[in-house]
Image (tube, rainbow, N blue to C red):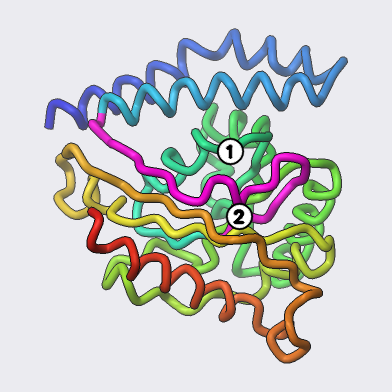
Amino acid sequence: MIRFLIVCITVVGFLIVAIPTMLVEWIIGKFNEDLKSRSSLKIVNGVFSLILWEAGVKVTALGEENVPKDSAVLYVANHRSFFDILVTYVRVPRPTGYIAKKEMEKIPLLSTWMRYLHCLFMDRTDVKKGLQTILDGVEKLKNGISICIFPEGTRNKENELELIPFKEGSFKMASKSGYPIIPVAISNSANVWEAHFPYIRKTHVIIEYGKPVYAKELPKEEQKFIGNHCQKLIEDMLRKNVDFI
């Protein structure tokens, strides 16, 4: 419970104390959007790294050499924990936006930082707005901003090795833009918090980055179901890493 309280204090404290920093970042963005993106990335990565240390999370990363350093990418990951965002975000080599639920846009201060970090808010109840979010994601990729999606659509609360069928819609960001997809397998993250809520416990999390997938290089039939293709790749990595946790 002590770890949980410390993490809560850190999160709330940052959102309040960093209000002046938020203003400075806004001003920077008026003159240099790229500088703002990179400075916001460093600030939030610093806070996320602190939270992971407070929570006692040890991360082993595999396959980071598969992530291109000279190009934006579409990260595609399984989703078991709120900590999935932290353990993946601290390792991104360039500004990266996440696709988040529309409801998160209503959270004061947090939603502002999310916009600074190029996050996009998906309204799953409105097809037209959902399509616009995908098009916005394509533009982000073309502007050098990587995007991360959790195509299960929600946190998988059941068997870690059996993923919820991936929603194909978000993969249009890759097929329309031509940028590579990086499959990401996150193992054991639910044991940080969700498996024994409200306690936070020391946990070993493994992240594996698969080789880039280019939509146009897949057979025509598989291009129609890129989500299914990536889901199989991630499930294979999860099964491989289960013995190392």
Q: Position of residue 152 (x, y in %)?
A: 48, 69
Left or right of residue 12, residue 22 in this image: right
Q: CA distance from mark 2 to mark 1?
A: 10 Å
Residue 178: mark: none
Secondary structure under the numbered disc 1 in the rendered image: loop
Residue furthest to the bottom in view is 221
Q: Is residue 71 magenta?
A: yes
Residue 147 drawn above or below residue 151: above
Instruction: Tell me if label 2 and label 1 are in contact, CB under 8 Å.
Output: yes
Q: Amino acid at mark 2?
A: Tyr
Label 2 crowd (10 A; few <14 / some 14-19 / many >=20): many
Which residue is pictured at 65% across the width and 43% down the height?
Answer: 97
Secondary structure category for the residue under label 2: strand
Crowd class of label 1 (few under 14; some 14 to 19; many from 20; radius 10 Å): some
Badge 2 or badge 1: first in the primary sequence: 2
Q: Quadrant of the N terminus?
A: top left
* Residue pointed to by mark 2: 75
Inspect the image, locate mark 1, and give the three-letter code of the amino acid beneath it.
Val
Which residue position holds label 1? 92
Kindly identify the residue that appears in the image at 23 percent across and 53 percent down: 245
Q: Quadrant of residue 204?
A: top left
Q: Nearer the viewer, residue 32 or 110?
A: 32
